[in-house]
Image (cartoon, rainbow, N blue to C red):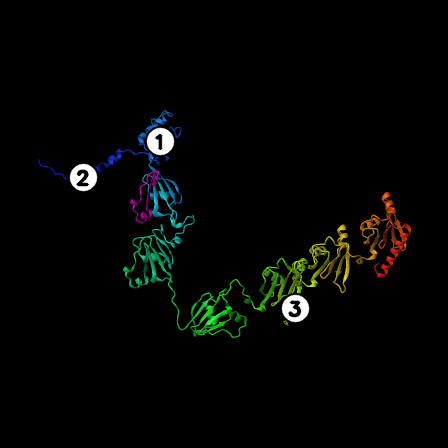
Amino acid sequence: MEEITVNRDQIFHLIAFLYLLLFPFFVLAVPYQVQVGDLVRVSLPGEESLDRSYAVNRQGEIILPEVGALKVVGLDEATMEANIHQSLQQIFRDLLNLKVYVEKRQQLINVLGYVETPGEVTLPANGTIQMALHQAGGLRAGAQLNQLQLRRGNSNTPFNYKQYLDHGDPALLPQLQSLDTLFIPASPMIGNVEVDFDPSKLALSGDAGENRKGVKVFGEVNSPGSFSYKPEMDLVDLLMRAGGVTRYAGVEQIRIISEGNPALFNLKRYLDSGDMALLPTVIEGATIFVPKQEEEIKAGANIVYVMGEVADPGAYENKSGATFMDILANAGGPTRFAESRQIRIIKGDGTIHPFDLAGYTEGTVPSGLPEIKAGDAIFVPEKTNMNEKSWLKIAPSRAVRVIGEVARPDRVEWSDEMSLLDLLAHVGGPRARADTANIEIVTPDESGNNQTTLFNLDAFIEQGQNEQQLPKIRAGSTIRVHDLPQDPSDNKSQWVRQSSEKSIYIFGQVGAPGRYMFTDRLNFLDILSAADGPTKDADLHNIRISHRNGIHAQVSKLNLALYFETGDEHLLPEVKMGDTIYIPEKERIWLDQQQQKMVRVMGAVHTPGRYRFNDSMMLLDLLAEAGGPKENAYLENIVVVNHSCCKGQSRSFNLTDFNRDADISRIPVLRAGDTIYVPDRGESLLAQFRNALGDITDIVSLGSLLGWL
């Protein structure tokens, strides 16, 4: 019998052949198990509520009417049918024709992240990643394709969907199972604010998803940004992706930093030679900077230099026939910080020539423009103090000066369309202490002589006058707004700041006598209050006002006490500038009193003298004014001599009897000019009275001779 030799390889191939031959039978022998998402068909003829399909939910259950939830996930069809049959036989008797089977195998997948309609989708049993994305409405613009994630339970599997789109190989995508979650992240290039995504604009800043791995290209390129790294690309590829270099690029000094090591690359040399060995190696995270080409220094025999405060300083070619203004205009002209009156021309031989450009434009420099030659330099200096106004920017023939108590005194360029009110508004208006009733305007006439005008702005506004009544202003005028003086009682030197025609004088018994400036709107009480009012010794019954507004001064009297008693405004005098107010003292010497208004009290009284009298007073009032009778006074024979109406007549009055009976009718009537005599008790009643009466007559006669009475 012949031996059959079989080696190990033959046995392996035989086993593999048998496995492939019998595998379909093994597969068919393993029953299918229900999974989440499947569609289960329940058929029971005669029962419409059960004759339908049921989807297996996420809990692995189907919901049957009158039975409720039944767990079916993980069961084969036979077991599932048996369990459902057992649950239904408690309700239905005839279940012989009951059939339960998997009608459609499906998967339940969650698609989240940067898709149009994220949520739960249902796929066939063999559904793919691309089908799941399609069911979710597709990817949104800005999704990061190379960082998609498949989450299954606690595991997270990232995969590169962009690579699948590039090659179309299904093996690059993971297989799906029911209850998987597919997450699509957004690209970090779109930022953290939700806006409309424009890939074309984003491409201008590069396409790198991670800055750490991207290659940064900036400087003189058209589209600087961070670009994704590809192993096969070189420096020229990156410059092309950045839009190429600009016209100002210094291609001979391109800088490359790789892993912290800087290097220079001469792109011009590479383009001239075509030597690939000159291209540097580009790695992940490299930085490429294209610098700006340094301008070539201009020099030569036909160059003029413009420096300082001009818009575009530099070296300019001196064309034939070019003037100073041509060259200055070519440099952009002086800036607003230029001191145009101090321009310097530095000649080629080293000499320096000053030039006043502002004066030339105003016509005050008759020498004309300076001659500029090749090699010369024009220097326009900066103003020494930028915070200081340039008062020379406006010619005096076009300016109006506003000085004094205004917010911003200044020289203002004048236009005939402006008025005095426009001018005051331009300088911020009068200050709080401005005397707006006496604005002084000095205006030159056509012959060059100045004319001074006073303007009352307060009256103009209060009376609503027309603007044609405003004083005329022309270029060259000066407007001065005076300030109201301070309290003259504090500093008498302030008086020189006001004229006598604008002052009111207050003398006598007031708190602060002196000179005061007031407007026409103030009345007598305003002026009296400004002088701190009357003192306690003021005689309010005999105030004198001297009016100087006419050819001859006039004096009026005021009983201010009567005004305070009655409140009659007609009693107050009208006071104007230049008037004088005098308030006398109560206790003046008796020579200042008029005898027609006085009563003499003599004899045994404490204070004999002359006392002011009015018709409301009686004998008792006069005795009280004189301090009352002394202890030795003869009260039973007080004598009253009438000098006013009945000269030579006298009456006696017994004050003692009056104190007992209080008969007012016994009191003699007094008139201004009378004399009251209280005799001494030690004298003889009749003889002493006659002697006293003779003495009184002598005194009266003497007073008449001396002019006292």
Question: Label 1 sits on what residue type?
Answer: Lys
Query: Which-is-in-front pick, marks 1 and 3?
Result: 3
- Viewer-nearest residue: 377 or 492: 492
* Residue 179 magenta: yes
Vertical order, 38 against 441 (above or below): above
Query: Which range of residues does the magenta coloring cover?
Result: 151-180
Residue 533 in the image, given as x and y percentages of width and height: 71, 54
The residue to which callout 3 is attached is: 451
Please name the residue that numbered disc 1 is placed on.
71
Contact (CB < 8 A) between labels 1 and 3? Answer: no
Q: Is residue 431 magenta?
A: no
| Residue 547 visible | yes
Asked if residue 616 shows in the view, the reply is no
* Furthest residue in direction left, as rendered: 1
> Who's the residue at 36% across and 27% down the image?
87
Labels 2 and 1: the sequence-earlier one: 2
**Label 2 vs label 1: CA separation?**
44 Å
Circles 2 and 1: CB distance less than 8 Å?
no
The mark found on residue 12 in the picture is 2
Disc 2 residue type (three-letter) = Phe
- Would you call the spot at circle 1 few (<14 residues within 10 Å), some (14-19), or many (20 or more)? some
Looking at marks 1 and 3 on the same chain, the residue that comes earlier in the sequence is marked by 1
- Using the image, tell me which numbered label, if any, was put on residue 389: none
Nearer to the camera, 645 or 270: 645
| Image quarter (top left, top right, bottom left or bottom right) of the C terminus | bottom right
> What kind of element bears circle 3?
strand
Q: Earlier in the sequence, mark 3 or mark 2?
A: 2
Amino acid, disc 3: Gln
